[in-house]
Amino acid sequence: MTEKIALTPKTHTTPPAKFSHGVRKGNILQVAGQVGFLPAEEGRPPTPAGPTLREQTLQTLANVRAILEEGGASWEDVMMLRVYLTDVDHFAEMNAIYNAYFENLVEVPAARTTVYVGLPAGLLIEIDALAVLG
């Protein structure tokens, strides 16, 4: 039986509840929903990368990437991305940022974007990912 491994990169704080930022079992890696918090610093509470969708989206993607790399994966291994926005008016801007970020990706993952209003105050985007390693 393949061992299940919880993933918490050095850039991330310990989760505030009983969950993992990511989990790998065999060749499957699931990244839990990530938001645009800056890398963890001792004594500093989680801090958004900035007030704009652009700042938070780029940091959120960096946070997802950190977990993928911690589990031995890359964007090329990602099969599915799920994006949650807090405002329907952010769709076009997020798509432009997303397209530019992944412009050199050989095979793009399936993706789903929806509006979700349950994120903590000030957070504009959350992204999770499912990767299957090679």
Image (spheres, grey):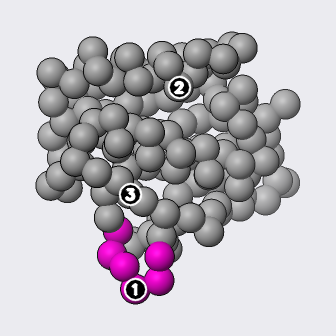
Camera sees residue 60: yes
Residue designated by label 2: 101
Magenta span contains residue 44: yes
Magenta span contains residue 39: no
Circles 2, 1 touching at the beta carbon (< 8 Å)? no
Residue 77 location in percent, x, y?
72, 30
Residue designated by label 3: 37
Could you tell me the amino acid type at mark 2?
Answer: Tyr
Could you tell me the amino acid type at mark 3?
Answer: Phe
The relative height of residue 34 versus residue 84 in the rendered view (above or below) is below
Q: CA distance from mark 2 to mark 3?
A: 18 Å
Labels 2 and 1: the sequence-earlier one: 1
Say left or right for 126 vs 128.
left
Camera sees residue 116: no
Residue 109 location in percent, x, y?
59, 19
Residue designated by label 1: 43
Circles 2, 3 touching at the beta carbon (< 8 Å)? no
Task: Label 1: state its secondary structure.
Answer: loop
Q: Quadrant of residue 57?
A: top left
Task: Label 2: state its secondary structure.
Answer: helix
Residue 111, label in figure: none
Q: Residues within 10 Å of mark 2 (few under 14, many from 20)?
A: few
Q: Who's the residue at 72% across and 37% down the image?
A: 74
Foreground residue among 62 and 31? 62
Could you tell me the amino acid type at mark 1?
Answer: Gly
Q: Provide the major secondary structure of the magenta segment.
A: loop
The relative height of residue 1 versus residue 75 in the rendered view (above or below) is below
Say left or right for 16 vs 39.
left
